[in-house]
Amino acid sequence: MSREQTPKILLIGFPSSAHGELADVCGGAGGRPVFLDGVPEGGGRANPDCAFLDGDGLDGDLPNAVTTLVERDIAVGVVVTRPDPEQARSLGQAGAEDYRPKPLTAEVVRALLPDEAVPAGAGEFVTASPGMQRLLEQVRKLARSDGPGLLCGSSGTGKERLAGFVHQSSPRYDGPLVAVNCAALPVNLLESELFGHEKGAFTGADQRRDGRFQEAHNGTLLLDEVTEMPVDMQAKLLRVLQEGMVNRVGGGRPEPVDVRVLATTNRDPDGAVQDGRLRADLLYRLSVLRVRLPDLEQRSEDIPVLAEHFVQLYARRYGRRIEGLDRQAREHLQGRRWPGNVRELENAIHRAVVLAEDGYIGLAHLQQEELSIDAVGAPPEEPVKTAEAEPEGTGDSQAGPGATAAVLPEEDLTIREMEDLLIERTLERVDGNRTRAAELLGISIRTLRNKLNQKGGSE
């Protein structure tokens, strides 16, 4: 990645002896480290994407350091040798989004980066399948060319991860890898997102903006779910591929871009052409490198390898001492169908790590897929109280620490308002510790931050 486009990660208070190792950690997360002895004054020319503080090095200045960074809208994490509950509560109230024992890992850094700053497909492609290894070797050879590519396969098979593998295997490996989800963007915003716009090009365009093609200059642009792109936009995309020039929305003079384009689809591309969802000429243009990833059931030998990989990944993220999977858990994973492929397997392991907390992951941790009254049961010494059984004058405000209200609010609320209320009460319960709140809610820190930002923007 270019220095301007690589996510910028502040590392504050860490000893110089650790700088080399931490630089490798940040590089593994797709970011660029900036080492500082203390919190800088002012935002600088380029605002950082996140910051991590060495709690041992800064010591008493930690709460003030966290507050200063949070006030500048910087996501903050803290690592210490010996975590302390009181310190965790204090820093959570100051706005720290993560607090955990050392060492700092690439997965932890990546979790704190904003969505748009995380390189798509960053990291290795994990496989033990001889067939997949042969396929990757062929992909590696074709990746050395500069031609566009189309990566096909069912949802959850790892197409974005394969795009990262292609990028890292290509001569553009030190350039940016920029991803665009074509299915997630409204049609009226897609052109601006891809090609940029001039100031005043449309209502709300209050300044000139580069598009994703310009951001990916000298690197790779990943168009996720390209068959969901409108056909007229596909024609403009084809022209950029042929000419190497982009026109901003509202602009007059084309600008040159040097970008390798990779696209993904979970549809059969030939069938998409017949259905009118994909232009035939665009398909031919993208098919210099055309790869189809198999479903997980076609490479079942990867299931235990991927499961152990995800166990270690999420155990490090949550600071768990997970030894691995026990025999029954491994047999269950191997014998189960995975229609959601690798993504479904990853989600199952993610949930199991959170439920297991320590020791080995067992069959019970993998089978608890949906929380319900039947699934979680009730403590035998404390029968579950219904709304009718609640004594008058008691309620949520008198519940003890860790108690969970089983009574719905009397007022009519939308699902969004109910979600906001749940987040608010969970944060109150953990004294504002976002890391702990996200864990209790079963979502990532990044998802919690996005929901809080949406809530704040709607008020």
Image (cartoon, grey):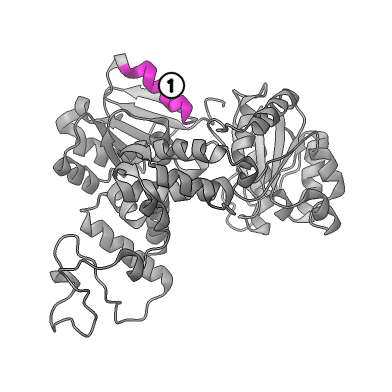
Residue 169 sits inside the magenta stretch = no
Residue 198 visible, this orientation: no
Please name whichever residue, 212 or 183, is drawn nearer the observer in this view of the structure.
183
Range shown magenta: 18-29
**Residue occupied by mark 1:** 24
- The location of residue 342, given as percent across then percent down, is 55, 45
The mark total stands at 1
Q: Quadrant of the C terminus?
A: bottom left
Residue at (82% x, 54% y) in the render? 271
Residue at (22% x, 54% y) in the render? 430
Q: Is residue 133 left or right of residue 237?
A: left
* Quadrant hosting residue 144: top right
* Quadrant hosting residue 327: top left
Please name whichever residue, 101 or 253, is drawn nearer the observer in this view of the structure.
101
Please name whichever residue, 151 or 326, is drawn nearer the observer in this view of the structure.
326
Q: Quadrant of the N terminus?
A: top right
Mark 1 is surrounded, within 10 Å at the Cα level, by few (under 14), some (14 to 19) or many (20 or more) other residues, namely: some
* Quadrant hosting residue 127: top right
Residue 223 visible, this orientation: yes
Q: Main secondary structure of the magenta part?
A: helix
- The location of residue 140, given as percent across then percent down, is 69, 25
Residue at (79% x, 37% y) in the render? 241
Q: Is residue 165 left or right of residue 286?
A: left
Please name whichever residue, 304 or 286, is drawn nearer the observer in this view of the structure.
304
Residue 27 sits inside the magenta stretch = yes
Secondary structure beneath dot 1 equals helix
- The location of residue 277, given as percent across then percent down, is 79, 56
